[in-house]
Amino acid sequence: MDFFGQRSKAHSAPNKKPTVVTTTTTKKKVAPQAPSRAPTVKKHNALPEAIQQRIQREHQTAAAKAAPPSNTSSRPKKRVKKTSQPDATTSRTMLGDDDADDTAIDRIAQGSRSTRSVFSYHVPRDIVSDDAYSPLSEDTRAKATRCITSRALVEASSCRYEPYFDGLDDHPVVVLEYPACDASEEFLLLVPVDSDEYDPISDLLCCVGAMAANYIPPEMREEFGTLESLETSSSAGMPLSRVSMASLSKLDSSHVTDHHDKDSLPPQEEETILRAFTKARNRRHGPLFLRTLERFNAKIRELRQRGVIAAQLHSLGQSHGVPEHVWRTIQEQVYARVVSPHVDKLKQYEAFSDNVYGEMLPPFLSEIARIAQLGPSSVFIDLGSGIGNLLIQASLQTGCEAYGCEYMPIPSDLAEQQIIEASHRWRMWHVRGGPRVESWQGDFTTLDRVGQVLRRADVVLVNNYAFRPQTNDTLSLQFLDLKDGTKIFSLRPFVSPDFRLTERTLSSPQAILRMEQHKYTGGCVSWTAGGGVYYVHTVDRQLVQDFVAQQPSAGAITS
């Protein structure tokens, strides 16, 4: 099966049903529809009435010009899709026009629905963490460092960060509450001058969205609002200093006079929390953002103390497992804090060697997990595990044991740091992965710990896209220790096209492997934007047994 559920042309022999209880959910992509709008309520607007009337007349005039004549048969002009990302110079929202905000938020909602994943893999299980849970080995626990906060990450960065919001000081620090008891994190409400760097405001809003959409029972989400109304895209490269003074002077007087006086803020009780976050972000309205964050934190604390969040998480785990929205958000947080500051070091490898670096991305592992039916009783090992992304994903997404081995020291060191940071983040988000996640540095063809895990493994992943033939041959010898039914996923085949099972090849690793070719789509590997092929090998010693049984001299062969 490929990523869209299409059956491969080459039919494979039926496999035994796995013992892991899993569910596979397929979502059909539907055409975007306008979000349902609540009854319009009168909103506070501090602009003079004359200006409000002028803006309304301009809206009506623009709408009349945009409407096509009723008796025309000409084709409408192609519309250019616009984003709701705040403008670095000026915007309608800076004039205090609530209708402009609503229009932008509606565009966000339509865009979010059109880009949802059409496929996901879920493993119902116990996902609620407790104080006794730790996926780290004793060696890793001994080297564990403290959780890396967003504030610490920004303050340690060599990149320049500047204020994004108007009305706050130059170093605004806020605290975000997490689902676990006594779990919180400090964020700086700054943005980097470089558009490619980490954006703490976007990170905070992504966390808010993941909690609101997954940790709050549906019947209690009215105050939070819909996820589609929350804008989380990065504002990196758009600090307040790049907004012209002329644009700032057009701000509503209530936005620029006394920002620190909460009594002067326009009432926002009629706004849902997520919509208020988006308006504050688009307007660069610092006091409104702070007030909305406090509303969110207060609600999380209340639901946490009442046990509502824990109950929702337990119910979600039993019916669904860890939602993709949650494990992706956590993994992005871990990567931003551990790998991103050192990403240039990953380019230090010998070209055209076995150590050429490339990453398999989350959709690829989700497909592997679906085919292999990874679950809490499974053992997964990644040979050439790089920075350990797939180990963390496999553990949290499926609850399996996850092990990896990486030859290059820099990626291996980052993998261990990522596993440590992930264990902290899982605790903060009140979720648990598999019983053990480990990454080792060394040669996987000779490391004893690799051999020990291979004998128990259910799934082996090998990113052998750049491996030399000799390396593949040496590695394949280790497959002789695998148990029947183990699946090996690779980007290059371990069974040559001209291989034939004969008396002379009975001892070859290729003799016990059934191989299928599958396709992956774009967005699955880091080294190309397009798709490609991968191979699924299943250990099946029955192939050799059947061959031997069919030979006239079977007794001589088996003796």
Image: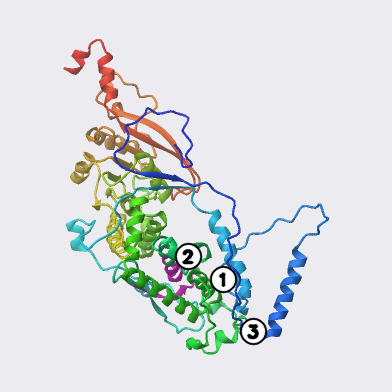
Point 49% across, 37% down: residue: 6
- The image quadrant of residue 290 is bottom left
Q: Cβ–Cβ below 8 Å for labels 1 and 2?
A: no
> Quick check: 127 left or right of 160?
left
Q: Amino acid at mark 1?
A: Pro
- The image quadrant of residue 171 is bottom left
Q: Distance from label 1 to label 2 (Cα)?
A: 17 Å
Q: Which mark is residue 46?
A: none
Residue 495 spot, x, y in % from top left: 35, 30
Bin the neighbour count of mark 1 within 10 Å (Cα to Cα): few under 14, some 14-19, many 20 and up.
Answer: many
In the figure, 197 relative to 165: above or below? above
Name the residue that disc number 1 marks: 86
Residue 228 spot, x, y in % from top left: 52, 62
Most foreground residue, 422 or 356? 422
Q: Distance from label 3 to label 1 (Cα)?
A: 21 Å
Is 273 inside the magenta-drawn segment? no
Image quadrant where one finds the N terminus = top left
Question: Which numbered disc, 3 or 1, marks the residue that appears first in the sequence?
Answer: 3
Name the residue that disc number 3 marks: 47
Name the residue that disc number 2 marks: 196
Residue at far top of view: 552
Question: Which numbered disc, 2 or 3, marks the residue that appears first in the sequence?
Answer: 3
Point 28% across, 38% down: residue: 475
Q: Amino acid at mark 2?
A: Asp
Point 44% across, 63% down: residue: 219
Callout in the foreground (2, 3): 3
Q: Secondary structure at mark 1?
A: loop
Question: Which numbered disc, 1 or 2, marks the residue that appears first in the sequence?
Answer: 1
Q: Amino acid at mark 3?
A: Leu
Which residues fall within the magenta stretch? Answer: 185-207
